[in-house]
Image: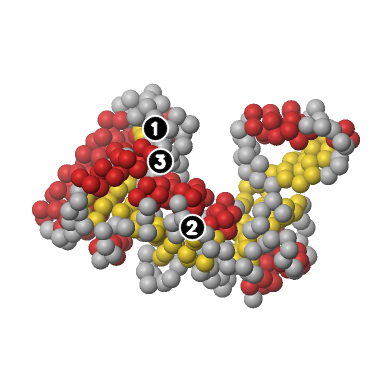
């Protein structure tokens, strides 16, 4: 059994839904995870924001506008009046649920309850269309098995037990359809796995059912060796180690959500990245096999802030770094890169929400300097320190670009450079020319 996840653009129109249905219909008895149709989640967030801002009339107009869009989808998707009527009635129920939800504007779960309807609508439309086409699909409600524990982490034993029970109850099903992203928390309240969480859903389901493979279907043919939005002539990377894929996902490769990697890696389940618009393309295979001797890809992470703490008192000061890290932990701010010297430490963050308070506390150690509008350029591949020349190629490519920080040796798969955001495009192109051409 495989797990096949399709993102919002893959089911973003009636024709795309038909294409996906044709693709999954002849692939065997698999579990299909769907995101909301593209644009839907943003519209639902906009609705919840209007409610929170005390503008119920705007919220109602937005709901009606989105509902009209789906009426058009239903009319175009179904070829028989019977199934068109069935799908219309079911979709109307979901929009009435949204209208009922906004009648309680003070609910702390308002946004999560509203946003969850996106995946519920897309899976119900796909399920109904498959039935119209004669496919014996079964809808597995994600809220019946996908749950997080008291720490907000996926409760894999619970997921495994309840998903197995649902599959056993539907032994005659030819295909299973379920929602990505949405779940319940340990109190049984509506929750979600954050943006991009449909990848996480697919990986967790794959781990729960010991899947043969997890397929992530998007609108690009695998993970490319550079960002095709800024660099011409990029090409898909055919094979990646889980650690390499995790580095690329964390440092900017948008095709895969970083959290997707861990459950698949721990259960040794290959992940394949495929293109819905080019289903025959080989895509990218991610597994636990390291292909040595190659730099695989380059990625960039934007909106980075660099913080430098310089202190003459740091020299041989026991516990200095511990005290610095505790400040960031206290303010729930993750650190991306870090370099040290005998008189200072430089580090980067991608979230400035608590920056003022962090800087205020860091001042007790010495002088604090802030550099904004920075970008991390990440070069990924077989970068063990015994290899000769790989880091030199990356450095040589950036010889004409000012580099604020370099991080090398923390991972066997990554060397990172901190540069000004304005130099990002030039850096990506230079790295491609030096490494891949």
Q: Is residue 266 visible?
A: yes
Q: Earlier in the sequence, mark 2 or mark 1?
A: 1
Q: Earlier in the sequence, mark 2 or mark 3?
A: 3
Front: mark 2 or 1: 1
Q: Is 395 displayed left or right of 382 in the figure?
A: right
According to the picture, the residue beneath numbered tag 1 turns out to be 185
User: Which of the 4 image quadrants contains residue 162?
Assistant: top left
- State the count of labels: 3
Callout 2 crowding tier (Cα within 10 Å): few <14, some 14–19, many ≥20: many
User: Which of the 4 image quadrants contains residue 46?
Assistant: top left
Could you tell me residue 326's position as x and y percent? 69, 31
- Which residue is most to the left? 82
According to the picture, the residue beneath numbered tag 3 turns out to be 156
Front: mark 2 or 3: 3
Q: CA distance from mark 2 to mark 1?
A: 27 Å
Is 216 or 9 nearer to us in this picture?
216
User: In percent of the image, x 11 and y 55: which residue is there?
Assistant: 81
According to the picture, the residue beneath numbered tag 2 turns out to be 255
Q: CA distance from mark 2 to mark 3?
A: 24 Å
- Which residue is most to the bottom? 437
SS type, badge 2 = loop
């Amino acid at each position: 059994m495989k797990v096949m996840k399709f993102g919002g653009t893959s089911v973003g129109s009636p024709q795309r839904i038909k294409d996906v249905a044709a693709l999954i219909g002849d692939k065997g008895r698999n579990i299909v995870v769907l995101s909301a149709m593209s644009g839907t989640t943003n519209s639902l967030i906009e609705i919840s924001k209007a409610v929170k801002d005390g503008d119920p009339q705007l919220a109602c107009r937005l709901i009606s506008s989105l509902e009209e869009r789906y009426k058009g989808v239903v009319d175009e998707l179904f070829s028989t009046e019977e199934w068109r009527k069935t799908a219309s009635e079911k979709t109307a129920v979901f929009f009435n649920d949204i209208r009922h939800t906004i009648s309680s504007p003070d609910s702390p779960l308002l946004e999560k309850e509203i946003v969850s309807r996106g995946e519920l609508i897309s899976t119900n439309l796909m399920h109904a269309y498959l039935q119209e086409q004669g496919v014996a699909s079964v809808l597995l409600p994600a809220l019946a098995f996908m749950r997080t524990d008291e720490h907000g982490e996926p409760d894999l034993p619970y997921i495994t037990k309840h998903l197995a029970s649902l599959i056993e109850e539907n032994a005659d099903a030819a295909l299973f359809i379920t929602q990505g992203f949405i779940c319940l928390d340990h109190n049984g309240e509506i929750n979600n796995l954050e943006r991009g969480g449909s990848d996480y859903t697919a990986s967790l389901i794959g781990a729960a059912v010991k899947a043969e493979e997890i397929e992530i279907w998007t609108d690009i043919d695998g993970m490319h060796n550079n960002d095709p939005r800024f660099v011409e002539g990029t090409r898909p990377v055919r094979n990646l180690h889980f650690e390499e894929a995790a580095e690329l996902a964390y440092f900017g490769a948008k095709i895969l959500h970083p959290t997707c990697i861990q459950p698949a890696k721990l259960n040794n389940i290959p992940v394949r990245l495929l293109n819905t618009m080019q289903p025959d393309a080989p895509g990218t295979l991610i597994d636990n096999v390291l292909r040595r001797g190659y730099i695989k890809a380059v990625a960039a992470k934007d909106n980075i802030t660099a913080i430098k703490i310089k202190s003459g008192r740091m020299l041989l000061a026991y516990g200095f770094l511990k005290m610095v890290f505790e400040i960031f932990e206290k303010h729930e701010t993750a650190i991306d890169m870090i370099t040290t010297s005998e008189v200072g430490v430089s580090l980067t963050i991608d979230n400035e929400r608590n920056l003022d308070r962090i800087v205020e506390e860091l001042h007790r150690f010495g002088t604090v300097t802030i550099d904004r509008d920075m970008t991390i350029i990440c070069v990924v591949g077989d970068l063990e320190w015994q290899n000769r020349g790989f880091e030199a190629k990356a450095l040589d490519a950036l010889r004409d670009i000012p580099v604020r920080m370099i991080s090398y040796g923390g991972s066997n798969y990554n060397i990172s450079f901190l540069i000004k955001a304005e130099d990002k495009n030039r850096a990506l192109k230079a790295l491609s020319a030096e490494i891949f051409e």
